[in-house]
Image (cartoon, rainbow, N blue to C red):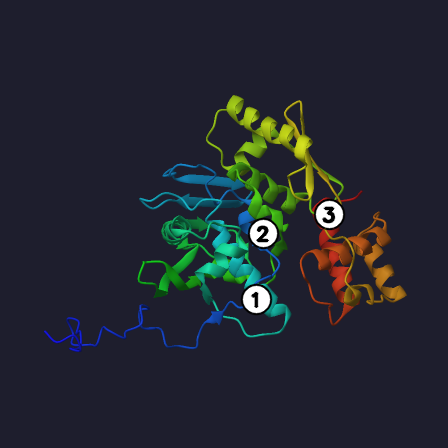
Amino acid sequence: MCENTLQLDSVGENTKDRSPLLPDRMQQADFFVCDIFDAAPKGDMASMEHPIFSISTKPDRRVRRYESGKNFVEITPSVKGLATVHDRDVLIFCISQIMSALNDERKVSQTVRFKAYDLLIATNRGKDGRGYEQLRAAFERLKGTVITTNITTGDSEIMDGFGLIDHFRIVRETREGRMQEVEIKLSDWVFNAIRHKEVLTLHRDYFRLRKPLERRIYELGRKHCGMKPTWKIGLPRLQEKCGSSSTMKEFRRLVQKIVQEDKLFGHMPDYALSLEDDMVTFTNRRTVETVISPALSKIRLDPEAYHDARTVASGWDIYVLEREWRQWMHEYDVEPPRNPTKAFIGFCRKYAEKRGRP
């Protein structure tokens, strides 16, 4: 055969000059393209509060149900196991990108497209073939894990069973089988949390924590300690909120080891840890941002606002509540209200209703 003869594939296409990339079969514009490499890591508060993700290093196929007051969450794995704490990196990456776009008043979508390489870099993952294989497995577990809950995100209470992502699609793939571009659709539950800014900023060293239990403990500290000086939780309750299946003796040993390493290296982001009499204490290292943004610090309240606030929050120091209100807006990326007086009084009312008289 002549050397210049065209090489044809099974469908008669020229293969000699063909790109090693698959054709883009998703020629659509109804998706959000991630293009901000250094967006601040953010996690949704609902899954930071509850043990949605497995901390096991082996496939976890247990059906788990957790109840807290009137709220419940039930997590059912696929045959490949529950989504893990490390799989959560995918959601953190997407949430971070979307929140950055929303803050810039750009249009976003529930369907997100990104370069796999960018996600691997941003979440401190390996960039070799194994890193891409682990990412594909993460997509499969996120899609296969089914959650049933009555916990609201935004103003919606989702009672149906749903996955953490609705679907994923590898849009472009190299000849070696490594994905280049990926498209995923976030679940309504996760996207509602994003749209209503029910998210918290995470320390970038979160992605450097090796142990799944370390990541989970940090998430709980970030959610519950926040900007407060300290937060304490009993070891049995911590085990429940971590979703650990270890015996109490083994869980105590694991936590004690993390505490000892933190005392030596100070490696836990934002919060120092201590364990005494089965009580874990989180102490704020003051690395969590406590400076109120200029837009929030410029808000001025008239005297009537303080008067009405004292009425709805009888007994509370109204100026302490004002500081709490401003810090709350900063912590949760709440935009300055159009009617500051109404917003402040509403905050004080809910604060007092939740905590009663001081």
Earlier-in-chain disc, 1 versus 2: 1
Q: Nearer the viewer, residue 230 or 22?
A: 22
| Residue 65 horizontal/vertical position (percent) | 45, 40
For image coordinates 67% across by 30% down, the residue present is 264
Which element type, helix, strand or loop, lies under badge 2?
Answer: helix
| Residue denoted by label 2 | 45
For image coordinates 64% across by 42% down, the residue present is 221
Q: Nearer the viewer, residue 9 or 280?
A: 9
Q: Nearer the viewer, residue 34 or 107?
A: 34
| Residue at the far right in the pictured view | 303
Residue at mark 1 to residue at mark 2: CA–CA distance: 22 Å
The disc at residue 25 is: none
Earlier-in-chain disc, 3 versus 2: 2
Residue at mark 3 to residue at mark 1: CA–CA distance: 24 Å
Which element type, helix, strand or loop, lies under badge 3?
Answer: loop
| Residue denoted by label 3 | 287
